[in-house]
Amino acid sequence: MSTMTADQRRAVAKQEFDAFMAACPSRALLDVIANKWVCLVLGALADGPRRHGELRRQIAGISQKMLTQTLRELERDGLVTREVTASVPVRVDYEMTELGNDLQRVVHGLKVWAEDNMAKVLEHRALAESG
Amino acid sequence: MSTMTADQRRAVAKQEFDAFMAACPSRALLDVIANKWVCLVLGALADGPRRHGELRRQIAGISQKMLTQTLRELERDGLVTREVTASVPVRVDYEMTELGNDLQRVVHGLKVWAEDNMAKVLEHRALAESG
DNA sequence: CTGTATCCCCAGAGATACTG
DNA sequence: CAGTATCTCTGGGGATACAG
């Protein structure tokens, strides 16, 4: 039987990261994923692969720059794959990886929360400024 | 019996908000809550009320300006309450509301995800730049 | 201790134009 | 269609000083 505590096993399985610490890499990662555009791009990819233009249309108001930039980050971090089909014109499809899908489940909660609780928040804001 | 579909009932219970739409208020709310400091502040308040200074110590690297600013936002939106005790020196406690606790459960997932998957992400980044 | 008020700077983000 | 390259500019956010 193991002589390790649960915490010790946890620390071995993965180094211990703590986003409360300023210098911890997970703080920076949290900054990357706790982001409006990341939520929306992953949300749009939840139902399957999407082309650049499709994403742009679905995520109203996102600039091409921010879309490309967000996709590049997600690709770099292994959350999304990019597949180029050499046709004329060229076709590019983005698809979530397993890791990306894992994160999607979490950030989807954020989007849903915002939509579901918008009314309550607006109500409270109205009270706050009148009061 | 009701003649409404599930979707219709849902639409009545709350107005329909959709963060994919640029002008929808929920898009702005998503921008507020999908935020590093919000995650960390709510995370620090998860175990009970905390004083200003306690929060500042627990969330390493947050400036006083960002802490106060974040707390004001959370207070305005009804996620956190602020209680002042008129002593010398003054004492201020922050505590999550029910709504805040509801959001905390969601954003906590973000923090945990970042910590749990940091290793995988770092691995992939290393591959990405070498490749 | 808690918080407001300034100053300042640079990175984030939009707009535009151009390329394969 | 997909993407890069610039330019610009706002505002996010740190540092500092002061106040109740």
Image: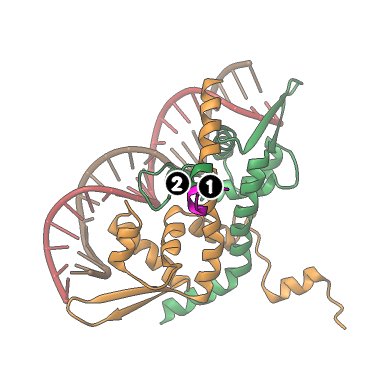
Chain colours: A orange, B green, C red, D brown
Position of residue A49 in the picture relative to residue B117 (left or right): left
Which quadrant: the C terminus of chain A? top right
Rendering coords of residue A38 (x, y %):
44, 59
Residue at 59 percent of width and 69 percent of height: B117
Instruction: Tell me the chain of label 1.
Output: A
Which quadrant: the N terminus of chain A? bottom right
Kind of residue at disc 2? Phe
Rendering coords of residue B41 (x, y %):
63, 45
Q: Cβ–Cβ below 8 Å for labels 2 and 1?
A: yes
The residue identified by callout 2 is: B17
Q: Is residue B5 magenta?
A: yes
Position of residue A82 in the picture relative to residue D2 (left or right): right
Foreground pick, B91 / D1: D1
Q: Secondary structure at mark 2?
A: loop
The residue identified by callout 1 is: A116
Rendering coords of residue B118 (x, y %):
58, 68
Residue A28, visible in the rendered structure = no
Q: How many marks?
A: 2
Q: Which residues are magenta?
A: B1-10
Rendering coords of residue A39 (x, y %):
46, 58
Instruction: Tell me the chain of label 2.
Output: B
Residue at 34 percent of width and 59 percent of height: A58
Q: Is residue A125 above or below residue A16?
A: above
Residue at 46 percent of width and 67 percent of height: A46
Q: Are marks 2 and 1 on the same chain?
A: no
Residue at 71 percent of width and 40 percent of height: B54
Q: Alpha carbon of mark 2 to alpha carbon of mark 1: how far?
A: 7 Å
